[in-house]
Image (spheres, rainbow, N blue to C red):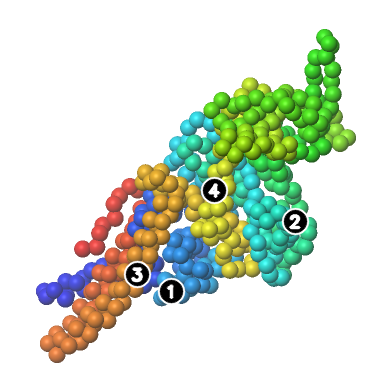
């Protein structure tokens, strides 16, 4: 048996395998995808597809295109998928109204929490972010106040709940919020008004952000992703948030607004107890001004005061709770001799009156992780970057962004990387290398094909057989780079820890 015949005996690649011409993907990302058990997770989330490319391949592509630094899914499909699935397959999946992206996200987040092995104090962190977007045919676009620009802008606002600890940050849930100002309605009705996407659209329209936070926190607790504290900035410093912590046994550490909310102060004056109600500004003037105390080891001055707060809304029975307010301001810089302005102070609230000022600030510092997440999401993880005007695609995008971040956290933890940026850069560089290798193979193939043509008189029909065998070798290699061959996927679905047989 000659060499050409032996090469032809390689097992043929089945139709359900990913095409080497298109799926030019780094082995690092594919290994991570396999090790997480993504096929099992997708199955548990109820992700199925009746025909065409398998759902795991479609989701893999939707997760991947950012790592190849393509401007859009369309460019990714054109430049990388080639003879594989087209962009319509990817967009059709994102536009599906029946897929439960929240459940898929929650399963990945749960896996991330277990990989991270978070220890010590853990905190839920909630915040929102606005992405400017324009277009009369983009449903869900409305006017929002953007803290970055200090003015109202047209765009989409995403509310996110995450779990923050010393080891890292994990996004747990996300929700779109549509304001009542200049909101752009659906340009066509949902196929099924009872679908998950239709229900989430109504939630985005009808629910307030505190109501959304309430639902997200309770879902996280029900899923077993526990925390000790709830952290939020001044935009969420409301009675509703404090009531939520009372219901869920969380300790709030909230930054509060300098508004007219009343606090009851009980103090002893000449041997008798005097009760007075103050708002934050009046309380500052009464107890804090000119009574600042330094915080050891930090460049801040602080003062705490224990008060009571009525959590009941109007016409409800009074519900008084004891809270601690921490007033903080920066110390003047010695080198500049600048003085701190009379308005340069902030106030924090917690229901744990045993917390010291430095402990409150240390806990609240965990909130910064969600700012890092939003920055990473907008710059590198495709946050609402998919070019689709279907509301279902917006839901898919915010969860895909969070899942990509979770994968980076898992990779950082398992590979011992210094930070997420290092992991992301490694994935992007490796993806680009494999993609370039695939394109380079097309050049080498043309050269080899030309060389074999010159030997056609000697080899005869064996020339075609040799070229087919070489193609089979290369395609098999690319499939193994992906680690998405049929046998591996079947073993993974059965949770069998068996190494796939390499092509020989």
Q: Which one is in front, 19 or 254?
A: 254
Q: Are marks 1 and 4 in contact (CB under 8 Å)?
A: no
Could you say which quadrant of the image residue 387 lies in? bottom right
As drawn, is 480 to the left or to the right of 241? left
| CA neighbours of label 2 inside 10 A, class few (<14), some (14 to 19), many (20+) | many
Please report whichever mark, 1 or 4, sits nearer to the chain's N-terminal start.
1
Please identify, in this view, whether the residue under mark 2 or under mark 4 is nearer the observer.
4
Q: Which residue is mark 1?
A: 79
> For numbered disc 4, what is the local secondary structure?
helix
Q: Residue at x 65, y 62 (%)?
A: 132
Identify the disc placed on residue 179.
2
Q: Are marks 2 and 4 in contact (CB under 8 Å)?
A: no
Identify the disc placed on residue 372.
4
Q: Quadrant of the N terminus?
A: bottom left
How many angstroms separate mark 4 from mark 3 (CA)?
A: 31 Å
| CA neighbours of label 1 inside 10 A, class few (<14), some (14 to 19), many (20+) | few
Please report whichever mark, 3 or 1, sits nearer to the chain's N-terminal start.
1
Most extreme residue toward the right, as rendered?
315
Residue 53 visible somewhere in the drawing: yes
How many angstroms separate mark 1 from mark 2 (CA)?
A: 38 Å
Q: Which residue is mark 3?
A: 436
Q: Residue at x 45, y 36 (%)?
A: 117
| CA neighbours of label 4 inside 10 A, class few (<14), some (14 to 19), many (20+) | few
Q: Position of residue 417 (x, y in %)?
A: 38, 46
Q: Residue at x 39, y 71 (%)?
A: 22
> For numbered disc 3, what is the local secondary structure?
helix
How many angstroms separate mark 2 from mark 4 (CA)?
A: 25 Å
Q: Are marks 3 and 1 in contact (CB under 8 Å)?
A: no
Q: Which one is in front, 64 or 142?
A: 142
């Amino acid at each position: 048996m000659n060499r050409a015949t032996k090469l032809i005996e390689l097992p043929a690649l089945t139709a359900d395998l990913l095409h080497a011409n298109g799926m030019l993907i780094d082995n690092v990302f594919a290994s991570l995808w396999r090790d997480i058990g993504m096929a099992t997770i997708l199955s548990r989330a109820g992700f199925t597809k009746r025909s065409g490319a398998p759902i795991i391949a479609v989701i893999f592509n939707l997760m991947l295109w950012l790592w190849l630094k393509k401007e859009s899914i369309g460019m990714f499909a054109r430049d990388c998928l080639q003879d594989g699935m087209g962009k319509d397959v990817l967009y059709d999946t994102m536009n599906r109204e029946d897929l439960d992206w929240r459940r898929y996200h929650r399963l990945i987040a749960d896996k991330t929490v277990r990989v991270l092995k978070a220890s010590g104090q853990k905190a839920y962190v909630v915040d929102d972010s606005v992405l400017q977007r324009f277009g009369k045919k983009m449903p869900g676009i409305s006017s929002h106040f953007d803290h970055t620009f200090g003015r109202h802008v047209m765009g989409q606002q995403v509310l996110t709940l995450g779990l923050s600890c010393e080891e890292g940050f994990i996004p747990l849930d996300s929700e779109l919020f549509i304001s009542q100002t200049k909101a752009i309605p659906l340009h066509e009705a949902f196929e099924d008004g009872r679908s998950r996407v239709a229900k989430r659209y109504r939630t985005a329209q009808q629910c307030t952000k505190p109501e959304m936070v309430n639902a997200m926190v309770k879902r996280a607790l029900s899923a077993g992703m526990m925390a000790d504290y709830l952290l939020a900035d001044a935009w969420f410093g409301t009675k509703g948030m404090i009531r939520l912590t009372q219901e869920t046994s969380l300790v709030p550490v909230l930054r509060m607004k300098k508004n007219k909310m009343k606090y009851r102060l009980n103090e002893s004056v000449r041997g008798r107890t005097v009760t007075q109600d103050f708002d934050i500004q009046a309380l500052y003037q009464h107890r804090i001004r000119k009574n600042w105390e330094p915080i050891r080891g930090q460049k801040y001055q602080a003062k705490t005061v224990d008060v009571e707060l009525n959590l009941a809304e109007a016409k409800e029975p009074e519900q008084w709770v004891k809270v601690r307010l921490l007033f903080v301001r920066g110390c003047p810089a010695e080198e500049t001799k600048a003085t701190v302005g009379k308005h340069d102070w902030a106030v924090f609230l917690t229901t744990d009156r045993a917390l010291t000022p430095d402990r409150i600030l240390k806990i609240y510092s965990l909130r910064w992780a969600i700012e890092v997440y939003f920055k990473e999401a907008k710059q590198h993880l495709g946050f609402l970057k998919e070019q689709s005007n279907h509301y279902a695609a917006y839901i898919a995008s915010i969860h895909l962004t969070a899942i990509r971040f979770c994968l980076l956290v898992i990779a950082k933890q398992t590979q011992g990387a210094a930070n997420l940026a290092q992991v992301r850069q490694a994935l992007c560089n490796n993806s680009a290398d494999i993609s370039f290798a695939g394109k380079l193979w097309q050049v080498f193939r043309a050269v080899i094909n030309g060389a074999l043509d010159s030997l056609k008189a000697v080899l005869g029909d064996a020339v075609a057989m040799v070229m087919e065998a070489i193609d089979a070798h290369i395609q098999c290699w690319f499939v193994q780079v992906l680690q998405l061959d049929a046998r591996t996927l079947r073993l993974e679905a059965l949770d069998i820890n068996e190494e796939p047989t390499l092509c020989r």
